[in-house]
Image: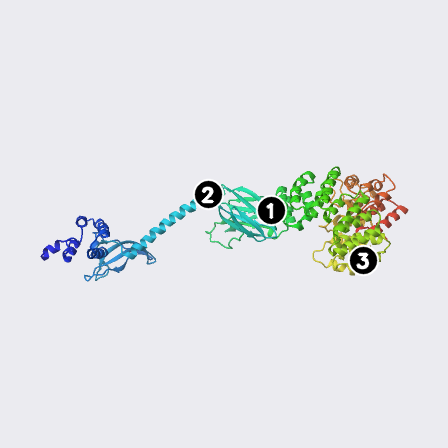
Amino acid sequence: MNAEEQDDLTLLERVIADSGDPELIPSSVLTAYRAGRVKAARALLFKHNKTERNPARKARQEEILRALRYWVRPANAPTMYTLNGVGTMLYGNYQPGEDGLHVATLWFTLVFIPFFPISGYLVAKAEEGGYYFFGKTPLPPFARVWRSLWATGALLLVIMSLYGAFMATTHTDVIAWNGFDVPIEVHVGDEQGTIAPHDDMTFRDVPAEAVNIGATANGVTIEELEYDFAGTSGDTVLWNVGSRGVHEKLWVRYGPGDPPDGELISGGPVIVLDDIDYPFREAPDQKSVQEGSYIDNSMLSSLDVDMPSINLMMLLIGEERPDDALAMMSSEFLVNDESHEYAWFVSRMALADDPDAAKAWLRPILDARSDSIELHRTWQELHSPAEQAALLEEYRARVAAAPDSADAHYLLARLLDARDDETIAVLDKAIAADPTHSRSWGSLGWNKGIRGDYAGALAAYNKQVEVDPDAYEAAQPEILRLVGLTGGSLQDQLAVANNGMPEGLTSWLGTHLELAARPSRADKIIEGWAGEDDVDPFLIADLYVTAGRLDSARGQMEGAESDMGMGVSTPIRLALSDGATDADRARAAALLPADDLPPMSEDQLVVALGFAHANGLDCVDALKAQVETGDLAGLVPAITGQADGVDDAIGGLGLRFQAAGAAALAAVTSGADRAKWRAHARKTGTPDELPFWR
């Protein structure tokens, strides 16, 4: 073959001619190649190479396939342009030949960094700069692998986007909040976890369908329910475990103007919120906004981190949400034994004095926590006198089921106060079952005291303090009264109050006792109380009344208000004292309007009744109506001048009411009767409860 014929051959035909093997390249490949279908020709040779039986020919075909310059196809020179490193550029010097040609790759670049391979070109560098382009080639191996990775990544991105869209419409995230003071165990479907006190846990991708959720604390089930999460995707779904948490939505504004008002959020157990940007975390301090514009971001925070349960309950009641308050306290009672002391208060406040509703609310809690004395005490007090027979049988059955239980006997004794012999016998059994049962000793002291066995009552109270020093604060007034009833003097009472008792429990009553014994030292004694921060002025006035320093008491109350019960009781004490003025009586009378009496305890009510009747106030009928519903009803006829001879009625009262009843009778009598009732009040009361009498 001469040189002219050689020039007419295609590159593949020249390779065949140079190899001396006319069968090196199949005719189908050559046909496609001559027709300008270079990519198709290369694909045919790839396919043929897989079945080639001649090893030498197979190896030579593979070399030809790798030599990209054999597979050039006509193409115009590409446009190359970049702006700040973004655009297209040639990179690479693949398979350089002796003729100065090599394969380069055209890349899409970001900040001059090759990012995505576009195509390969057979090029030669021009002396004046730039390139001569001889046509397109297949991509070099590295660029081909890089493009494959990009394709795989794009496919994965599409799959993930589709999966995300699927999950977003069929699943949701649930934030579980633990508003309790103890850790709780929770589960959402099959997922479980332990949440620390006042903390949260997020359960991801919960199916948007009916899912079982539940929680326990200290082995007690707080909650177990099926909740349908359908339609909650994209929202903030808060599982307020046990309805215990009380939350608020706050707004932070970035830009001019004030943010929207916050919102109290409670209820539950599941709360779905559609506009919370930062659940249980603070929003950023700053954000960039266009001048004159603003952005509002919402935060979800929890109030129960800093507020005790009883305060939260009162907050909800103030918001006219008693059902939420009851739901919160129900779960609190299941978890927190110390909260049980609020059971009576909760039932009164949240249920508007509806005893039937209160019993329906308390019954399942009592069944779950049947070991709680406080819950049983509330249960008993919710029953009317007409229901006492059935209630008594309920607690007799408890004793029969647990004959060695001091708690069971004590609770039965609380219902037997009208049965003298049986009450004492049941309490004796309680103490026999548990000689350290503090409540039974205290109840025994009270029951013996109202039956006139003052020495036995004092011995029982002293035994209560011996087995339970913490009980002294509650037992102290009864002990001090009993000291007087058994013949002791005020100095004896002072000695009992200040010696041999737990430190810190006698400060208030002890101060009154010392003032009554040593009124000349009033300024020195009161100085410690007056030096406290934010001290209630009526508290100081109360101390001055005991010391007989009525002018000082008036000065403390002048223009002042009280957040304590003393705001009513202290002015009445002053108005009934020896040395009271018309102005003192007018001040006290102003606190007792006929149509809106302030809240008072039973002993305060009966003293107020004595004061009102003695001064001809319009509120007498309103006070009578309240006193007649309680234990002091038997004193009303004598106080209001409708009957004589109340010695038996007052003798049958509990010790805590005898002093108040005697003080009321002293206010409406005169002469020898007044002296008698004053003496009885001094004997049964402590100085902080009585007017100042010389």
Which SS class for mark 1?
strand
* Contact (Cβ within 8 Å) of mark 2 with mark 3: no
Tell me the tag on residue 170.
Answer: 2
If you read the primary sequence from the N terminus, does the residue marked by circle 1 or circle 3 appear first?
1
Report the front residue among 674 and 217. Answer: 217
12 relative position to 504: left or right: left
Q: Residues within 10 Å of mark 3 (few under 14, many from 20)?
A: some
- Residue at image mark 1: 222
Q: Amino acid at mark 1?
A: Ile
- Residue at image mark 3: 496
Tell me the tag on residue 145.
Answer: none
Image location (x, y in percent) of residue 343: 68, 46
Q: Is residue 248 visible to the viewer in this orientation of the structure?
A: yes
Image location (x, y in percent) of residue 80: 27, 55
Q: Nearer the viewer, mark 1 or mark 3?
A: 1
In this rendering, the answer to whether 420 lies above or below 198 is above
If you read the primary sequence from the N terminus, does the residue marked by circle 2 or circle 3 appear first?
2
If you read the primary sequence from the N terminus, does the residue marked by circle 2 or circle 1 appear first?
2
Q: Is residue 552 visible to the viewer in this orientation of the structure?
A: no
Q: Residues within 10 Å of mark 2 (few under 14, many from 20)?
A: some
Q: Nearer the viewer, mark 2 or mark 1?
A: 1
Q: Amino acid at mark 2?
A: Thr
In this rendering, the answer to whether 318 lies above or below 504 is above
Report the front residue among 272 and 216. Answer: 216
Q: Amino acid at mark 3?
A: Val
